[in-house]
Image (tube, rainbow, N blue to C red):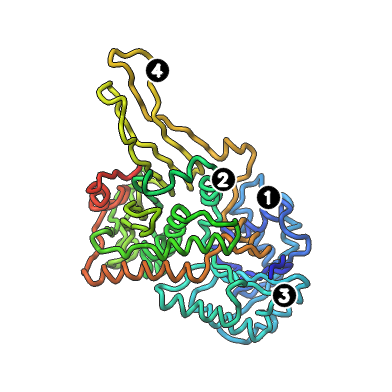
């Protein structure tokens, strides 16, 4: 049953995510008139604050993370906020929290951004205070476990209080405009779907590259590593959107049914189809940076880079490799999907000075949102050999195509959908479990083979073995 909530309860309301993403996103939604006039936002965390102190805290966060030109209507937004301190580990305090929330006339949406170890105690506390009823929905921020077993434990605890249709698991990549545009590109344009298969696509590349190192995530990242931090969630969601069959409707059930079919069709990966790496000291954009062990302060075998050759074993994608690559301290920050089409079956221009290149679709997700399709075209002018061809791009830069459109934080879309009850861009439990099952098998293979990360210099594109992983198939990473 769908409802538009008139209460939003934020756990972890003083944390980094709240300051950088949640409060600015909610402010932007309010400024654009997208939040209902009666929506109240209640923050809770361990810190002891009054309502006015929390509003000052929120004001400081907005002034820090929002550009000056987007800070209008500040007072109106801050009036929506209130605060209740809470120690989530004990049942004491949840009744006071329930009193602060009040009785929502439409419904309550809860955003749970805490350490995974607090999920279970928090659910019990909410139950004890009557905050898990039919008019309450729960949103979970990652990480949801460290493997399939711990993920199931968390999901079981949440399922004890909330049915699946009231659980919203966030993967913030699904809130990005270009990720959603991938669905529009595929299913709103007749030209692509007939070619979107093994007969016409040679391979797919998905790259999520970061220039940063640990950045205050020391404890979490050293336990997680690249494959659990990026591949298990963001990259597999991107792969599923690329590879899914057309859903019958654009709704939560139909879209997620097709995604989970892809995830279940992923072929188990052998160790030889993966490369792991860990950065050593180098330079990023001309600035010297330390190696991973130096940043961590101890030696570690945690991978900061991973490349994987994956396959989706179904009729549409049989034989098409999906090359996944992600890492820290790489030369530039970029997230992109490359659809490499097959070569033309026969070139009529052979021997006439023409060098044929296959068509390529590049979907840029960040830092710039754009779509580029490369085509072969004749070079203008006269040539004794008859005709010369060159690859030229057709560019769709989103900011140019939709001039005046505001570039939004991904959480804006997701928070709005949470309040309104639309699960389409959230991850279902069977998706999460299929993702963990595939990733757990990869990590078990590494352990069985005794594999440890190869070193790579910060500022490079990872270990040379990652280049070889693709090159032995005649594929070059798009850079």
The residue that mark 3 highlights is 101
Q: Secondary structure at mark 1?
A: loop
Q: Is residue 392 depicted above or below 466 in this figure?
A: above
Q: Quadrant of the C terminus?
A: top left
The residue that mark 1 highlights is 71
* Tag nearer the camera, 1 or 2: 2
Q: Nearer the viewer, residue 386 or 23?
A: 386
Mark 3 surroundings: few (<14), some (14-19) or many (≥20) residues within 10 A:
many
Q: Which mark is residue 380?
A: 4
Mark 1 surroundings: few (<14), some (14-19) or many (≥20) residues within 10 A:
some
Residue 31: image location, x then y, percent = 71, 52
Image point (58%, 61%), residue name: 424
* Tag nearer the camera, 1 or 3: 3
As measured in the structure, the alpha-carbon distance from the residue carrying label 1 to the one carrying label 3 is 27 Å
Q: Is residue 163 visible?
A: yes
Query: Are the residues flagged by discs 4 and 3 in contact, CB closer than 8 Å?
Result: no
């Amino acid at each position: 049953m769908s409802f538009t909530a008139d209460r939003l309860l934020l756990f972890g309301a003083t944390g980094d995510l709240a300051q950088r993403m949640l409060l600015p996103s909610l402010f932007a939604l309010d400024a654009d008139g997208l939040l209902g006039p009666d929506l109240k936002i209640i923050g809770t965390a361990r810190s002891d604050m009054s309502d006015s102190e929390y509003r000052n805290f929120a004001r400081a966060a907005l002034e820090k993370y929002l550009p000056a030109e987007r800070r209008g209507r500040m007072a109106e937004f801050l009036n929506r906020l209130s605060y209740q301190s809470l120690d989530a580990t004990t049942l004491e305090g949840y009744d006071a929290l329930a009193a602060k929330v009040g009785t929502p006339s439409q419904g309550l949406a809860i955003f749970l951004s805490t350490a995974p170890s607090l999920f279970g105690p928090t659910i019990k506390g909410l139950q004890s205070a009557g905050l898990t009823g039919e008019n309450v929905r729960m949103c979970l921020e990652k990480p949801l476990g460290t493997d399939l077993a711990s993920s199931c434990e968390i999901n079981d605890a949440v399922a004890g209080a909330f049915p699946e249709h009231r659980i919203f698991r966030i993967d913030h990549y699904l809130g990005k405009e270009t990720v959603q545009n991938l669905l529009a590109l595929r299913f709103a344009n007749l030209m692509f779907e007939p070619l979107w298969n093994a007969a016409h696509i040679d391979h797919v590349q998905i790259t999520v590259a970061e220039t940063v190192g640990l950045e205050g995530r020391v404890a979490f990242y050293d336990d997680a590593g690249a494959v659990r931090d990026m591949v298990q969630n963001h990259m597999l969601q991107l792969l599923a959107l690329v590879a899914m069959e057309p859903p019958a409707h654009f709704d939560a059930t139909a879209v997620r049914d097709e995604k989970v079919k892809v995830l279940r069709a992923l072929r188990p990966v052998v160790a030889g189809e993966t490369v792991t790496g860990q950065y050593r000291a180098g330079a990023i954009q001309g600035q010297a940076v330390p190696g991973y062990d130096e940043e961590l302060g101890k030696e570690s075998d945690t991978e900061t880079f991973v490349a994987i050759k994956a396959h989706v074993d179904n009729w549409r994608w049989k034989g098409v490799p999906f090359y996944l690559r992600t890492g820290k301290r790489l030369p530039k920050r970029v997230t992109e999907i490359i659809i490499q089409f097959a070569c033309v079956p026969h070139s009529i221009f052979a021997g006439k000075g023409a060098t044929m290149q296959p068509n390529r679709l590049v979907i840029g997700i960040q830092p710039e949102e754009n779509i580029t399709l490369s085509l072969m075209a004749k070079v203008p002018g006269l040539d004794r050999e008859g005709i010369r061809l060159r690859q030229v791009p057709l560019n769709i830069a989103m900011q140019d195509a939709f001039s005046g459109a505001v570039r939004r934080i991904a959480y804006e879309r997701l928070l709005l959908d949470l309040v309104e009850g639309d699960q389409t861009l959230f991850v279902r439990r069977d998706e999460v479990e299929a993702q963990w099952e595939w990733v757990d098998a990869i990590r078990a293979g590494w352990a069985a083979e005794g594999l440890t990360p190869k070193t790579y210099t910060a500022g490079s594109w990872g270990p040379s073995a990652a280049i070889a992983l693709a090159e032995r198939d005649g594929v070059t990473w798009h850079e």
